[in-house]
Every structure is written in C-alpha cells, then in structure tokens.
Image: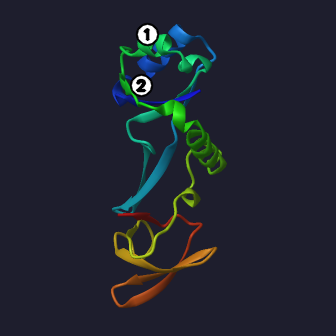
Amino acid sequence: MWAVLKINNKNLETLKADFTNKLGKDVKFYIPKVKLKKFLNRKIYTKEMLLLGDYLLCFHKDFTKKSVIASLKYSRGLKYFLNEFCKSQNEIEKFIFKCKENEDKEGFIKFDFFEYKKNRNFEFISGPFTNMIFKIINEKKFYIKTLIGNYRVTVSKEKNLFRAV
C-alpha cells in the first residue's frame, strides 16, 4: 500500500534508513524529480527540484496496520503521514505510472508530463527570447504558437525552451 508522507528534505536519507531498518528491505520510495535549466550570463545552469516539494510516496504492504504507522510516526525527517491515503490508492498508482512513463534515462520527469494551458504565463529559458514572458495562443502536437507583446512566435515543444512562471 502506498502512503503519502510530508518530510523534512534535509533529513531524507535518515528517514529512508530509519524506514528500512524498521520495515525491512521491501519498502519502496518514489520521489519524482524535475531538472530545470536556466540561461544566465551566456551559461546554462541546471537545478534539480522535487516535483512534489516536501512530499514523497512510500510503499510497504503493512501500511494498512495502524500499529506500523504509529511505530513510524516519530521517525527523524518525517513530519506526518497524510490522512486517508488508504482511500486514494488508485489515484496514487495512476500518478506514479504517469510519472514513470514520462521519465528520461536519468530518472527526471520530461516536460511532456506537464500540460500547457492557454492564457498562462511562461518564460523562455534559452534562445533569442531568453527571460521574456509569453502566453500560449494555440497548441499543436509538436509546437506551440505564442504571443510575445504584439508578436506571434511558433516554438517547438521538444526543445524545453520555456517554463511556467
């Protein structure tokens, strides 16, 4: 059964070790990550971010037992277990499947995972329009038509040239 945990990111490795010691080696953790790229001063900087912020997904067959959760409640690095995670197993599994389906070779979530919404602000992170903010006018399979001020620009989806603002 999958559980959703709110964690302290600084003590993540301690938390994993503590859970492994108490539950055994059959405990699984899933923490989806995104790699962001930023173009600044003619250099590209990359930053890893956790997709769920300070939440992680943890699987163990004994999470149905309240005694197991009570024994883990005060683990170092754990803030709390989210309530009612038992009722949301289908949604959690669908989310994990969608994330794993959209991971690259390094285990980072691809930008295909995110849906582009019209009338939402985005920012170019590389190319001639770096740091300029734009809105999406129209979305096609391989490209997006954008509006930058009064100019219409067509941008490829596959190059990851922009991010949501």
**Rendered image: mark on residue 4:** none
Task: Please tell me which residue is depicted at 35% across the width and 14% down the height of the picture.
Answer: 74
Instruction: State the SS at label 2.
Output: helix
Q: Nearer the viewer, residue 33 or 78?
A: 78
Q: Residue at x 63, y 17 (%)?
A: 26
Identify whether 67 is placed above or below 33: above
Type of amino acid at the residue the image marks with label 2: Leu
Per the image, label 1 sits on a secondary structure element best described as helix
Foreground of the two, 100 or 46:
100
Q: What count of labels does the image hold?
A: 2
Q: Work out which quarter of the rendered image holds the C terminus and state it.
A: bottom left
Q: Classify 21 as above or below 142.
A: above
Direction from residue 79 to residue 145 in the image, left or right? right
Residue 34 versus residue 69 in the image, above or below = below
Q: Are marks 2 and 1 in contact (CB under 8 Å)?
A: no
Q: Residue at x 36, y 16 (%)?
A: 76
Q: Earlier in the sequence, mark 2 or mark 1?
A: 2
Query: Residue 18: horizontal and vertical position, in percent?
Result: 46, 13
Quarter residue 72 falls in: top left
Is the residue marked by circle 1 packed among few (<14), some (14-19), or many (20+) residues within 10 Å? few
- Residue 1 lies, in percent from the top left, at 59, 26
- Residue marked by disc 1: 71
> Could you give the CA–CA distance between mark 2 and mark 1, rounded to whole angstroms?
18 Å
* Above/below status of 149 relative to 142: below
Q: How is the image coloured?
A: rainbow
Residue under label 2: 12
- Does residue 28 appear left or right of residue 54 in this picture? right
Please name the amino acid that badge 1 sits on. Ser
Neighbourhood count class around disc 2 (C-alpha, 10 Å): few under 14, some 14–19, many 20 upward: some
Q: Is residue 51 visible?
A: yes
